[in-house]
Amino acid sequence: MGTDLSPESLALLREAIHLAEEAERGGNLPIGAVIALDGEVVARGRNAIWQPSLALTRHAEMEALRNIPSQLWPKSREMTLVTTLEPCLMCAGAVLLHHLGRLVFGSMDPLGGVTSCLDTLPWYFKEAFTRIEWRGPCLPSECDPLYQRVLEYERRRGPIPPARPAQA
Ligand SMILES: [Zn+2]
C-alpha cells in the first residue's frame, strides 16, 4: 500500500477536498470523491447522509460510483477513485464489486476504515483486492483536518436513534 502521490493524483485529491468542503457547507460530513478515467474526471461524489434527507449509505464514494456514465463501465479497470478518507467496509466492497483499477485516499480512518479487516475479508473480496492498486494515506496534511471534523460532527450527533418497532 503506497502513499506517494503523482501530480495528477494530487490534483484529483484537491478536487475531492473541494467536494468535501461543499458537502460540509450543505450540512453533511466533509468527505468527497472523484473518479478519473484517462486523466479526466468522469464522476464526482459528496457525502450526503444527512441532507437533503437521512440516507446513511450516501457516502461520497457511493455517490461517485452512481454518477459514472453507464457507457463507461467497460473501462472500469482503467478508472481511479480518489477520496479524501479511507473507505469504509461498504464503499471498499462497492469499489471491488465494480472492478475499479485504482484507489487513492487522503487520510486514514482508524475507526471505520477497511484496512483493519483486509486480512479477514471473504474470499471473493480478498481476491478482488489483489487486483486493485490501493494507495493511502496520501495527503494527511490536508485531509486529516477534514477527518477531525467528521469525528466532531459524529460526536455532536450522538448515536443513531433506533428504528421504531413496527406496530403490531
Ligand atoms: Zn463508505
Image (cartoon, rainbow, N blue to C red):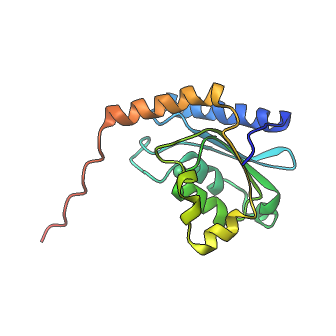
Q: Position of residue 40 (x, y in %)?
A: 83, 44
* Viewer-nearest residue: 131 or 158: 131
* Tally of marks: 0
* Viewer-nearest residue: 64 or 107: 107
Q: Residue at x 56, y 71 (%)?
A: 122
When asked about the image quadrant of residue 16, the answer is top right
The vertical placement of 81 against 9, above or below, is below
The vertical placement of 88 against 47, above or below, is below
Q: Viewed as shown, does residue 19 lie left or right of 58?
A: right
Quadrant holding the C terminus: bottom left
Q: Residue at x 54, y 52 (%)?
A: 116
Q: Position of residue 149 (x, y in %)?
A: 47, 28
Q: Viewed as shown, does residue 45 lie left or right of 130?
A: left
Q: Residue at x 45, y 45 (%)?
A: 49
When asked about the image quadrant of residue 91, the answer is bottom right
The vertical placement of 3 against 22, above or below, is below
Q: Position of residue 128 (x, y in %)?
A: 69, 68
When asked about the image quadrant of residue 34, the answer is top right
* Viewer-nearest residue: 115 or 47: 115
Q: Residue at x 53, y 58 (%)?
A: 117
Residue found at the far right of this picture: 38
Q: Position of residue 114 (x, y in %)?
A: 55, 53
Residue found at the far left of this picture: 168
Residue found at the far bottom of this picture: 123
